[in-house]
Image (cartoon, rainbow, N blue to C red):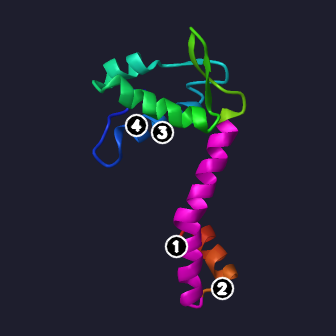
Amino acid sequence: MNEILTQEKSIYIQISEMIENDILRDILCEEERVPSTNELAKLYAINPATAAKGINILVEAGIVYKKRGIGMFVAKGAKEVIQKKRKDAFYQDYIASMLAEAQSLGITKQELVQMIMEGK
């Protein structure tokens, strides 16, 4: 979690994505404690409520859960949940528009696969 916050997205979204990235990279594993909102607030010099909003996104997605009085922990299967969510977003953000553009240009699926395989 040593990433730098940017102006591109809301801070709370960046916080949730940083934690997701740490889970994907196996920096945070299932049943490991996630940094607290106060730790995140201190680390990034942000309001604890902003950090909490980022954590709550992960709770709602079933990626982290709260152990009362102890903290937030990575849920079982969290990595798979994140991968599925990001694969779906990748398809929507990149593949769907690429397929539409290829169709408008008369590029067949076989040609498209060949372009991808050849790195063109």
Residue found at x 67% / y 41%: 81
> In the picture provided, is 46 more to the left or to the right than 74?
left
Q: Which mark is residue 120?
A: 1
Is 57 rendered above or below residue 52? below
What's the distance in space between the residues labelled 2 and 4, CA to CA? 41 Å
Most foreground residue, 75 or 108? 75
Q: Which mark is residue 62?
A: none
Pointer 4 or 1: first along the chain: 4
Residue that mark 4 sits on: 12
| Three-letter amino acid code at the position of disc 4 | Tyr
Contact, mark 2 vs mark 3 (Cβ under 8 Å): no
| Three-letter amino acid code at the position of disc 2 | Thr
Q: How many marks?
A: 4
Pointer 4 or 3: first along the chain: 4
Pointer 2 or 4: first along the chain: 4
Residue that mark 3 sits on: 17
Identify the residue at the far right of this view.
Answer: 77
What's the distance in space between the residues labelled 4 and 3, CA to CA? 9 Å
The image quadrant of residue 67 is top right
> In the picture provided, is 12 more to the left or to the right than 98?
left
What's the distance in space between the residues labelled 4 and 1, CA to CA? 37 Å
Residue found at x 53% / y 66%: 94
Residue that mark 2 sits on: 108
Overall secondary structure of the magenta stretch?
A: helix
Q: Residues within 10 Å of mark 3 (few under 14, many from 20)?
A: some
Stretch in magenta: 79-106
Horizontal and vertical percent position of residue 106: 59, 91
